[in-house]
Image (spheres, grey):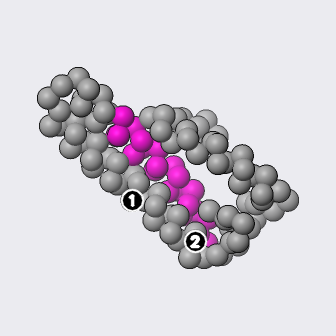
Amino acid sequence: MHGLADSTSRRRIILWKFILGAILSLVLGVFVFITADSLFWTVFGLWLIGIGFNYVPLAMYGISFIRPGALQRELAGLDIPAELQRYAGLQTWVFLPLALVYLAIRQR
């Protein structure tokens, strides 16, 4: 949510991306699952639902970081460019259904 140049508007845009990602993936996944007429579409619908659930913890973290100073406290002492590079690869985990849900539960 920080990027190389932190801004409130950037955090809000990313937060809305997480919220809409959760809602739209879940709604589309349920629709595809309910209307599926083959195994492929059934599995695809379940996959979309799993991705939608992955966006829920992201949205929850995003909401907690939107408060003034919260993100800066979380990032204090970190090498921001190195962390951005690391997370560029880690963000692909969102495509593995329920992976981020599992990691969020495990982290708590």
Measured in 3D between alpha carbons, the distance from the residue under mark 2 to the one under mark 1, in whole angstroms, is 15 Å
- Name the quadrant containing residue 47: top left
Name the residue carrying label 2. Answer: 10
* The label number, if any, that marks residue 63 in the structure image: none
Badge 2 element: helix
- Name the quadrant containing residue 65: bottom right
Residue furthest out toward the right: 77
- Residue 58 among magenta residues: yes
Q: Residue at x 47, y 57 (%)?
A: 18
CB atoms of marks 2 and 1 within 8 Å: no
Amino acid at circle 2: Arg
| Any part of residue 105 in sight | no
Instruction: Name the residue nearer the viewer: 49 or 86.
Output: 86
**Residue 28 x %, y %:** 27, 47
Q: Which residues are magenta?
A: 47-67
- Residue 53 among magenta residues: yes
Judged left or right of residue 48, residue 84 is right
Q: Residue at x 40, y 52 (%)?
A: 22
| Any part of residue 70 in sight | yes
Name the residue carrying label 1. Answer: 20
Q: Residue at x 23, y 23 (%)?
A: 39
Instruction: Name the residue nearer the viewer: 19 or 104.
Output: 19
- Name the quadrant containing residue 49: top left
Q: Earlier in the sequence, mark 2 or mark 1?
A: 2
Judged left or right of residue 45, residue 87 is right
